[in-house]
Image (cartoon, helix red, strand yellow):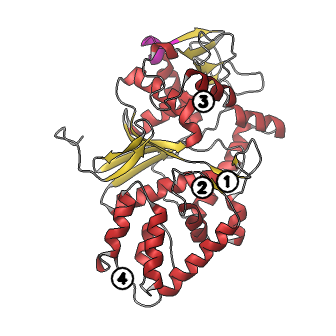
Amino acid sequence: MNDNGQLGPVAMRIYDTATQGVKDFRPNKIVKLYTCGITPYDSAHLGHAATYLTYDILQRHLRDKGYETRCVRNITDVDDDLLAKARELDVNYLDLAAFEVAKFQRDMNALGLLACYGEPRATSAIHDILGFIAMVLEAGYAYTAGGSVYFDVSSFERFGQISHLSNSEMLALAKERGGHPEDPYKEDPLDFVLWQPSLDDEPSWDSLWGPGRPGWHIECSALALRELGETIDIHGGGADLIFPHHECETAQSESVTRNQFAKHWMHVAMVKLGGEKMSKSLGNLVFVSDLLKEHSAAAIRLALINNHYRNSMEWQPEMMDRAEERLDSWKKSSVGKKLSLSDQEPFAVRIRELLDDDLNTPSVLEVIDEEANKGVNVTAAAGLLGISLE
């Protein structure tokens, strides 16, 4: 709401995971976004690129419409996967994180992503996390057992409001995604860890509940609240984070603030290779850094946004050939005098209307193709997508 308590005008329409439909997005002039960032134990792959590119296009569109965007993307630099990888390599976990974060940032910068408003690390928020856990306990939504602090999902009536999964589906995903439903200290298998004892070779911080380290979900709640306040306009990340991460994040946040945590939940579908989700655990990865050795950043962007962000994509090397051809066509039509979009009506209107419609980038590319085939200079239109034709 604005200063007068009124909703702002409709900026665009975006699919909301929680309500399972496309709905009006009505932010204030400053749009607060939070997207879950990397756990830095390996290089950035196309799944990462697709997610962060979607948020890049979203921000560019909102800025084109006159909004200021503040997008926070965290770094999960204390986590089971990171600690396991550091143990395997016999290196300090923070050294490994620093090395991988530097590579990730080089890749994202090479792709031309807008700079984040904030990129906080989980280890920077231990004080905030401890205070937040204390508030969850005080509010009656958590309990201590076996040296850990657990969130009590039975105490939060709206648990499941984001994912809309059955109990059995939640249990299956919790087991698959590190939720440890078999933990004997849990009162309910779906309860999740806020604080846990550290192993001998893991980092540890003092707390009221004993030395240990934070759970995965609490890190994002603490960082989001610290950086953006109690209510975020759009929260998201990859679709694999809907459960358990975002479901748990919402429950613990709203249990303390009593306010809606995120107005919109915007999730990006998976990039697949060989029929399986592209992931570090499966090893079926296409790394951004490798693609950049053979292709331009503009072509990589085109290849990824030729697929709507809500549809999963089966990656094929031929996609890069098509993207390079498209880019070449746009460049050939755009020699000579450059025109601003204000000089290219109704072309610009069509593009903006398609972006207003839940970021319909595949259709935007088709419209630009049509104009390029007519010999129209499409430099300004490509710029809306973060693509330089120079």
| Distance of label 3 from label 4 (alpha carbons) | 48 Å
Q: Are marks 4 and 2 in contact (CB under 8 Å)?
A: no
* Residue mark closest to the camera, 3 vs 4: 4
| Distance of label 3 from label 2 (alpha carbons) | 22 Å
Judge whether residue 378 can be spotted in this image. no
Viewer-nearest residue: 222 or 336: 336
**Residue under circle 1?**
45
Judge whether residue 46 can be spotted in this image. yes
Query: Which segment is the magenta one?
Result: 135-142
Q: Crowding at label 1, few (<14), some or many (≥20) Cα neighbours within 10 Å?
A: many
Q: Which mark is residue 49?
A: 2
Residue 200: x %, y % from top left: 77, 21
- Left or right: residue 253 versus residue 173 is left
What residue is drawn where x is 54% and y is 53%? 52
**Residue under circle 3?**
216
Q: Crowding at label 4, few (<14), some or many (≥20) Cα neighbours within 10 Å?
A: some
Q: Are marks 1 and 2 in contact (CB under 8 Å)?
A: yes
